[in-house]
Amino acid sequence: MIGERWINLAVPLALLAVPLYALMADEPFTITLATRATILALAAVGLNIALGIGGLVSLGHAVFFGLGGYAMGILAFHAQNYSPLEIGPLTFAGTKSMPVIWLVAVIVSAMAALLIGALSLRTSGVYFIMITLAFGQMFYYFAISWSAYGGEDGLSIYVRNGFPGLNTLVPIQFFAVCFVVLCLALALNAMLRASPFGLALNAARQVPQRVETVGLNPMRLKLMAFVISGAITGLAGALFADLNRFVSPSMFSWQLSGELIILIVIGGVGRLMGPVVGACLFVALEHWLGGLTDFWHVWLGVVLLGIVLFARGGVVGLLTGKAGPHV
Amino acid sequence: MSEPILATHALCKSFGALTATDDVSIDLRAGEIHAIIGPNGAGKSTLIAQICGALAPDAGTVELLGRDVTGLSTQARAQAGLARTFQISALAMEDTVLDNALLGALGAAGNPWRLWGRVSRDAALRDRAMAALDRVGLADHAGTRTADLSHGQRRQLEVAVALTLAPRAFVMDEPMAGLGAEGSRVMTGFLDGLRQEAPILLVEHDMDAVFALADRISVLVYGQVIATGTVDEIRADPAVRAAYLGEEA
């Protein structure tokens, strides 16, 4: 069996190797696929902090993904139309700068996560799942009815946003940006897990009554995890919108929330590389099986069933030989 | 008589028609072990839940160190110096023994908001956790996954986590539950020495342990305290013999 340290090293290297190979073989579409997998992995790394360490089964993480997407869409929309963005008495100029967009995406998603988390965390179990789902649907229908920003049709951004010193229209350069962000998020995840906060959060998932009895508030610990989690998923949403140069209400859809959970379960809940492995497999299946049949989700379901029944630790758990008892 | 460390005054709690706690006033004084005994369903767990803040009483107050804590949450009472152990071990089973003790140390430090730095390399937390593990004899098992501990070792770890808090009072819910004769003897010896550090409110079914340890015993039957006194007084009390000890005594 393989040590988890090796997996933590090998998985990012493998993900990096795919677009480098594609670059040499001159297959730009493969680079786009790898970028898509990288961004989905980033979104799932975010969810994995709430789900894997905190045990919060959020079926509403598409809210943050969508908010990140719309943060990008709205800012870039105003920039490409040279129209000012008016929020109440304040007027902002739109922007095509990725770092600024990311900052806005992270702040907006974190604030939304604080609000949604503070309300949702009063419940637990299936009620928590349902209330996060309900928030997701609220945002979804709001986006559909928001005609100023395209309503159901969404917003198209004609030119990808810029990053200082890079030409983001070159697929490999945009991949590099996404890959670095993913690595930073993974490092953050590993740091959190080992920190005093991570220890307390991990205990709050397993035995909340114990955490209370030592004088700590499990709900606040989970709320903090939910906010960090939402912020990372929001950042992924901004990148995803930039990848497609398009944002639409489907980024808020509950199917997307579900897919994020599915790819974490496939990769390994609570495992550092679980979301990355899951996202890569998901995109690979989507691409190859999707090319053979429109009903490729059936086969995804078979994979998921196999994992849930026979490999509770996901693919990473299977490789390390440790049946991760997480969640 | 010195001021009690922990006290309840006329505590009442009902669940529908069932009165689980009926006008219970007990106190815990410095340096003593005060045992609560009573048949199954007497309301011992309900009483503990109210003392520790998991359950709000219908009437009455709980005082800790002379301060009314009735309206405080479980975590506020823990911060005020109350440490409890659970009847059924409530430990993070996936984590190591040291991690569980570190959680206690983190609670005692009161700040879980540091998001960076490895908790296992924090010397202050680690020393505190290891000292507690050492006292219950689990120092050699610090790296063991808690799920791999024996039942008796888990009971010891329960106590160790409480120790990391350096509390002013312990509330222990059946620390001997499920321990064999030898384990019970070791735990009894340990608790015997612990009372000097902080008094212990002890709910226990193991009568040998209760009679060996308790300075005072309160007998709870149908939610009411029918007697409080020394071991000899309780042994001799006819009401207690009739209601509870019966053939067992």
Image (cartoon, coloured by chain):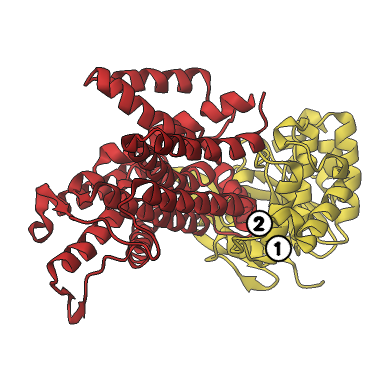
Chain colours: A red, B yellow
Examine the rendered structure and indicate whether residue B2 appears above or below residue A39. below
**Residue A110 appears left or right of B205:** left
Q: Nearer the viewer, residue B203 or A64?
A: A64
Marks 2 and 1, how far apart at CA? 7 Å
Location of mark 2 (residue): A214
Q: Callout 1: 10 Å neighbours few (<14), some, many (20+)?
A: many
Quadrant containing the N terminus of chain B is: bottom right
A262 with respect to B176 (left or right): left
Labelled pair 2, 1 in contact (Cβ < 8 Å)? yes
Task: Name the residue type under label 2.
Answer: Val
Residue A182 at x, y percent in the picture: 47, 49
What amino acid is found at the position of numbered circle 1 in the picture?
Answer: Ala
Q: Quadrant where the C terminus of chain B lies?
A: top right
- Residue to which mark 1 is pinned: B108
Question: Residue B160: x and y, percent?
Answer: 79, 49
Both marks 2 and 1 on one chain: no
- What SS does tag 2 mark? loop
A43, above or below B180, in the image: below
